[in-house]
Image: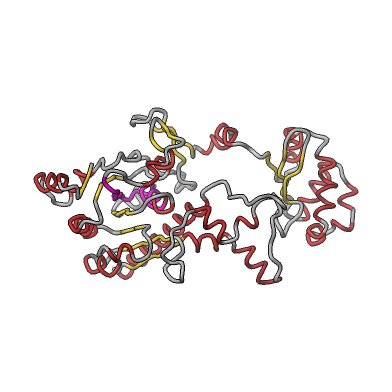
Amino acid sequence: MSAILENITVIDWTQNVAGPYCTQLLGDLGATVIKIERPGTGDDTRQWDSPSWDGEATTFLAFNRNKKSICIDANDSKGQEIIKKLVEQADVFIHSLKPGSAEARGLGYEELAAINPSLIYTAISAFGESGPLRGNPGYDPLIQAYTGIMSVTGNPGDDPARVGVSMIDMATGMWALTGILTAIINRSKTGKGCRVGASLLETGLAWMHLPLTNYMATGKVPEKIGTATTMVAPYEAFRTKDNWVIIAAGNNRLFSSLCHALDIQKVLNDPRFETNKERVIHREELHQAIEERCIEFNAVELIKILQEANVPCSSINKTNQVYEDVQIQSLEIIKQIEGIRIPNFKIIDLPFRIDSQRSMFRLPPPLLGEHTTEILNDSGYSSEEIELLRSSKVVGG
């Protein structure tokens, strides 16, 4: 699978999570990814070093494998010329600057497309490319708040809660990847490049697709409902003697199986619970009736009973349980990487396979400016020119 994009070169002028995740995905698929970083400091996430792994920030390590790092001062005219030279032979250029910032440096779409008409120029922003907030900075939790995700996350009456993973950032990277791959397909037909845009805000709105559709249909503002979902019941967490178990009976057949497995025939025969619509209306009464039975078991016992009846269910696992889980280990998505500077380094691979194959780990997350000399040499700069650029601090590493 790592050979799919082996002829694609990506110039990656992004930092934090959304952009680097997008370019890491491209690298995992075989693209050559050249990561441009600020001399001296590099990607902000290099300083997000709590926690760290063998002295290196885990956030940077998680989103920057299969890349080469070059340090360029993009505020210097000579640095801008280096970037333009890299773009001449590139297929994709991607940045995560505020709208207008690349253009102010002479690195906007029009300028770079004039150099390389087949270039796929990709811009990732926080609030999008139009509107009064277009120039504002934004991060994952801010967008979770702005788009209403926090308003539907958590239990009724609780303080606001962020979804506990970087879902906005990572999904924005995935949407940007979708746009880039679509553009690559289109370029194979037309020979022309294009401009791809993605934003954290639009990603947040995409995640709110169903709550917004429900609001537009009913005029009712969705609220927090804990582990449940608005349109199906029972579809939530239930207490046991020692833990919680999620039960997802998404249709009448599964509801019947659940009631038979728990020997609660009276619930199955109750007219209040005859259809999913009725079960949703009477969710609280249904929850109480099921939980009265669940509480008689511990979580392991209840899951065994439900799995034997083919009722979808799960314990609410902690991270260590996920890591040690037999099913997850069998998928071989968590890979140990040998022979690099970090002992016992592991990665989370791409969550799909092609012809049963996952991606190939080719390069560890780079040290800051690790490949500056190599990349400049490959771009035609002489050793003397490179030393002059380095001594004038146009490049680093």
Q: Position of residue 293 (x, y in %)?
A: 84, 40
Among the 4 quarters of the image, the one containing residue 111: bottom left
Q: Taking 289 as reference, is 175 left or right?
A: left
Q: How is the image coloured?
A: secondary structure
Q: Nearer the viewer, residue 396 or 370?
A: 396
Q: Residue furthest left?
A: 384
Q: Taking 33 as reference, is 130 left or right?
A: right
Q: Taking 10 as reference, is 263 left or right?
A: right
Q: Nearer the viewer, residue 23 or 18?
A: 18
Residue drawn at (80%, 55%), measured in percent from left and top? 283
Residue drawn at (11%, 44%), measured in percent from left and top? 383
Residue 363 painted magenta: no
Q: Position of residue 7 (x, y in %)?
A: 28, 53
Q: Is residue 118 above or below residue 174?
A: below
Residue drawn at (37%, 30%), measured in percent from left and top? 342
Q: Nearer the viewer, residue 51 or 307?
A: 51
State the quadrant of the C terminus: top left
Q: Residue furthest top?
A: 343
Residue drawn at (45%, 62%), measured in percent from left and top? 199
Q: Which residues are magenta?
A: 22-39
Q: Position of residue 288 (x, y in %)?
A: 83, 47
Number of numbered discs visible in the structure rendering: 0
Among the 4 quarters of the image, the one containing residue 214: bottom right
